[in-house]
Image: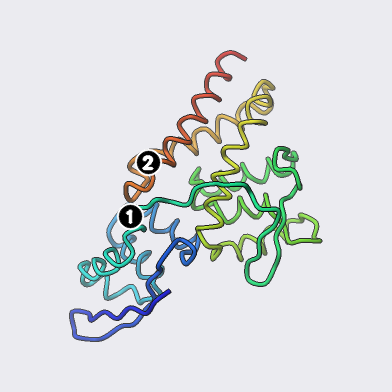
Amino acid sequence: MKNITLTDSDGVVITGRLPRSWSEVGLAHYAALAVATNWPDRCRALAALCELPAQPFLDDVSLCLPILRGAPFLLDGPLPMPGTPPNSFRHLGITYVPAPANLEQIRAGQLEGLTAFLREYEGNALAAAPHLLAVLYKPEGSELTSAVVEASAAAFTSLPMAIGYALLLDFWQRSASWALPIQRYLAVRPVVEQTLNALETLSRPSASPGRSWNIVRWLIAIWTRHVKKALKTS
């Protein structure tokens, strides 16, 4: 992060921090910006992302321009893309590992947790990202209990987008390997359809702040087409 100084309409100088890359943008901060549907919420999200007070932005929206010019990737991307998932990663001094170790598998309890958090956040997968990752990754040496999930989710709100978003995309891609077979069972079919609806909502142009979402929408569209085709034939 680099320091940024702005002067509000009253001549008051305010100082914050401008991110230089996705490694300096937390999941929750970006989620708030990405899902904002009105200018007051966008101003608050942008101010929080840069550690600035919100009121000057609410009073003078033009203060957003220096930030967007200084960190154009926030709107224009590209967003972090998935690579080979790490065996572990560190955040706030804690090492996290996949739970289970093989992400090609998923436990019934994890699936229930994932869909529960999607319901809680009304299908907004990005806003639910810290909780979703907390179900998929656990502190090394810990059991995946509800208390551990809540603690990890709180920590993951500040997980850098460079790590967290790439992990989410990797999971969405890998989930096809188990989502397609399990949808054949009527008891699980509503879960798959609910996940489809959540991802389709996330992939709509109106849900995104800029061109950086084009690749995300493309990836999700491919995944949902495969699942929908399987749903029709099962």
| Quarter of the figure that contains the C terminus | top right
Quadrant of res 183: top right
> Left or right of 109: which side holds 162?
left
Is residue 142 or residue 93 the one in the foreground?
Answer: 93
Q: Residue at x 52, y 32 (%)?
A: 196
| Quarter of the figure that contains the N terminus | bottom left
User: Which of the colour schemes (rainbow, by chain, secondary structure, one colour) is used?
Assistant: rainbow
Q: Which residue is mark 2?
A: 214
Give percent across and percent down for residue 74. Answer: 36, 58
Q: Secondary structure at mark 1?
A: helix
Q: Which residue is mark 1?
A: 75
Q: Residue at x 48, y 46 (%)?
A: 124
Give percent across and percent down for residue 205. Answer: 34, 40
Q: Which numbered marker is on residue 197?
A: none
Quadrant of res 179: top right
> Left or right of 78: which side holds 171?
right
Identify which amino acid the numbered label 2 is placed on.
Answer: Asn
Residue extending furthest toward the top: 233
